Amino acid sequence: MLTIKDLHASVGEKEILKGINLQVNAGEVHAIMGPNGSGKSTLASVIAGRETFTVTSGEIIYKGRDITSLSPEERSWAGIFLGFQYPIEIPGVTNVNFIKTAVNEQRKQKGLPALSAAEFLKLMREKMAYVEMDSSFSGRGVNVGFSGGEKKRNEIFQMAMLEPELSILDETDSGLDVDALRIVATGVNKMRTPQNATIVITHYQRLLDYIVPDFIHVLYKGRIIHTAGKELALEIEKRGYDWLINE
Amino acid sequence: MDANQFIYVPDLSAEDEFRCRVLLPDNLQQYIINGNVRGGKTPFELNLGRGERMEKSLQIIGVRNAACKGELSFEETFRFGPGSSGRIISCSHTLTPDEFSTRERMVINLEEGANAEFFVMQNEHNKARHDLRCDISLAEGASLRMVFISLHGGEINNEINVDLNGPHADCDLSGLYLTDTGQKMSNSVQLRHLVPDCHSNQLFKGILNDDGVSKFYGGILVAPDAQHTEAFQANHNLLLSDSSRAYSKPQLEIYADDVKCSHGATVGRLDEEELFYMRTRGITADEARLLQQMAFAYEVLERITSSELRERVLSLVEGRLRGDFASCKGCTKNCC
């Protein structure tokens, strides 16, 4: 589904990604771990098409084509979703209006008619239940006045509405208490199918108890320095990253 | 069409009979047709008696077309007697892109406990200039809410003078101005708290594109014995282009010591983080920018209490931001 080959990306003069190689197949869950400043969030943003970063060399092949020149919306239409570490507040745009615009834009791109008000409401209720969100959220400004946990649930709700094939969740667990973490993880697990894939970026092994990865990659100074199975998380939890860095 | 054309229609639908008492000069009575009144050069005057309530909004539509180019001055007086209430909608349009200069003066007088709501919209072509001066006074316990929408126009100058003359008067002014190529819009407020215990609020927001220019002058005066005054003011501007300019000048003169006053002015651009966020959800860059602008404008539009009117203005503003010269579809058969 996703093949990243020798990806280099920089912001201004500063190179942040220094040759990433990654292969993600349908049905897999990959976790990316690594110390602060290693480039995890940058990698997520670059896959989603953030224009602040310049891809200086390498390729991001998604479903058979290089997407490095595509806009963020084109990548979204192709089935890529980025769950933000810090979801953006948009005062004045209601949650319901926001997600409706997004869903109907996706449908338009697929040549499907816009959902009727009734169809949309039904879909929204169903997906809100995934993350135990109540309907009072829909009339509020996007993420405005939401607690940390509510913002992350809103990310997963949006993901459920858009039904992406490749989801990248950037530190979805940060700022969550145990209950919120369980809710968010349950939402993500409900959406897992053999046809889609998830990349989970996290600092802690905790999230990986709930969303069990097939592979764990350790990112350090813009490179993946180690790849292993799910057992690696526990080892990192005990020993930190130093032993990997020193290898 | 006559030179000073007014169309007075009783309601947004323009279907019903006119129900509030409007004193019109005799020579205009002949123009009343199915509840629509068209008039000539005599000043318009609305007088509401004690306790009188307008059951429906009164819409005043000023239309200018090629038959009457050049300068035009007129005056409208609104007197709200003690405890009376009503809602006035005033729209100014040009139908042709000719050179027009319109000087309009609105005199608004609210007596004790009167409650009025004014919605003022200007939607004119690029060569049109519109100078609107509002002279407003509020007596004890009177309450005025006024929303100015400068949707389109070559040059629009709104001068708004408010005197709060009686305690517990409450005045809420808000405005939205949208400028693009060569357009200039200015709002100049002089709000005077002359007695204690009054409340005022000003919120003016602008979205500027191309080489559009806006000016906001916000004067607040709190007289020496106007204690317990609450006066708030905000002016926010969104610049969509490098060559647009927004000037903002708050000016507070406070001579009383027990007051709550605040002012704030900002000039900014669309938020890139918000844009990226929306685009990762599949919303196109253009649509995301439009959503942001509508969100920015909404803070002013939500001050329009009539939901019917608010919805209509929302769609006009959206059309305008999408680049149309918005027209009031379905507003009245006699207009755009």
Image (cartoon, coloured by chain):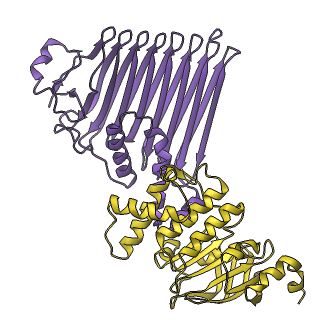
Chain colours: A yellow, B purple
| Residue visible at 51% across and 88% down in the picture | A63
User: Taking B38 as reference, is A239 above or below it?
Assistant: below
Relative placement, left or right, of B69 versus A75 is left
- On the image, the x and y values in percent for residue B65 come to 21, 37
Q: Quadrant of the N terminus of chain B?
A: top left
* Number of callouts: 0
Residue B211 visible? The answer is no
| Residue visible at 71% across and 63% down in the picture | A178
Displayed quadrant of residue B236: top right
Camera-side residue of A192 and B142: A192
User: Taking B157 as reference, is A19 above or below it?
Assistant: below
| Residue visible at 18% across and 22% down in the picture | B40
- On the image, the x and y values in percent for residue B173 come to 48, 28
Camera-side residue of B45 and B215: B45
- On the image, the x and y values in percent for residue A164 come to 50, 76
Relative placement, left or right, of B188 versus B30 is right
Displayed quadrant of residue B47: top left
Relative placement, left or right, of A201 versus B312 is right
User: Taking B312 as reference, is A45 above or below it?
Assistant: below
- On the image, the x and y values in percent for residue A89 come to 59, 54
Camera-side residue of A183 and B266: A183
Q: Quadrant of the C terminus of chain B?
A: top left
| Residue visible at 54% across and 23% down in the picture | B200
Residue A96 visible? The answer is yes
Camera-side residue of A32 and A231: A231
